Amino acid sequence: MRGFLRRRILWTSLLGAASVTLVSVFTLWEGATTRAAYLTGWLLFGVMVLLTGYNWFKKIPYLPLGRSEVWLEFHLYAGVFTGLLFLLHVRGRWPTGWFEILLAGLYAVVMGSGILGIIISRGWPKRLTARGGEVPFERIPLVRRALCEQAEALALKSVAELKSATIAEFYARRLQSFFAGPQNFLSHLVEVRLPLNELLNDLNDLNRFLNESERKVSAQLVELVRKKDGLDYQHALQLTLRLWLFIHIPITYSLMLWSIAHVVLVYGFSAGAR
């Protein structure tokens, strides 16, 4: 814990020093030359190259490039630093023209998805552990199918053995769709348990119309509902973690390609103007 705190203080101090230095140099350059945007532009592009390279560094662990943990921390704080570089580069104004707007939009998406990635990669594993451990993502459909089969068997059992259709009718009306697939995706992401509580309240109300044997079946259904809700929780968080990578990394590569095109156009037009 102390080591983590020391590293955070160190990286925050480096970020603060780099930011103050950047603003000071930019202020001097802006008053002395009309090409201050080139300074911030090349700095921004260089830092973005390093940030994009982080994904490649992870794929070549045999090279002496330092610990992955250090590169991750650099990635996080350097990403924040690019925000200041971007604001100075555009002088605090949203760009005009479709090319610049698209380029700025790509940067905004990369930055936003990066911030989201920090939140979910740091906080969501703890949430998964707190809800009873992590189920491998590939096994979730199998576990879901098993729970569905158990719930359906209980509903049929109530008809065949208890000679009552009350539980079976409730299952068809309220539980069949619940067990059929993932449910309450957004509610799980924001830790809202209202849908589960409503379903459990309906099951509790159903008990008033059941005899003792049927209540035992109802209690088993309640347990299956809780397990299924926990499984949906696992599915929602793990799926979002996976989808985040499919958004952040491809958009980052798109940003780099558009940035290269931006550099070519800038120097092309500046040469033409001269």
Image: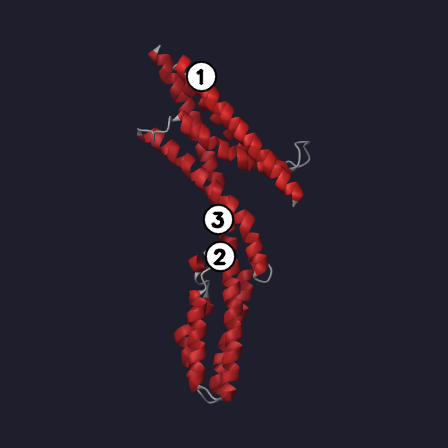
Q: Which residue is at 53% across, 63% downward?
A: 231
Residue for point 48% across, 48% down: 243
The mark found on residue 28 in the picture is 1
Q: Which mark is residue 111?
A: none
Kind of residue sitting beneath label 2: Ala
- Of callouts 2 and 1, which one flags the residue occurring earlier in the amino acid sequence? 1
- Mark 2 vs mark 1, foreground winner is 1
For the point 45% across and 86% down, the residue is 210
| Residue 150 vs residue 31, the one in the foreground | 31
Residue 257 to residue 235: above or below: above
Amino acid on which the number 1 mark rests in the picture: Leu
Residue type, label 3: Leu
Residue 102 relative to residue 72: left or right = left
Is residue 70 something that shows in the picture? yes
Which of the two marks, 3 or 1, is nearer to us in this view?
1
Q: Which residue is mark 2?
A: 236
Q: How much space separates mark 2 and mark 1, taking CA atoms?
A: 50 Å
Q: Residue furthest top?
A: 274
Residue corresponding to mark 3: 243
Between the C-alphas of marks 3 and 1, the distance is 43 Å
Question: Callout 3 environment at 10 Å: few (<14), some (14 to 19), or many (20+)?
Answer: few
Upstream in the sequence, badge 3 or badge 1? 1
Residue at (48%, 42%) from the top-left corner? 115
Say which quarter of the image contains residue 77: top right
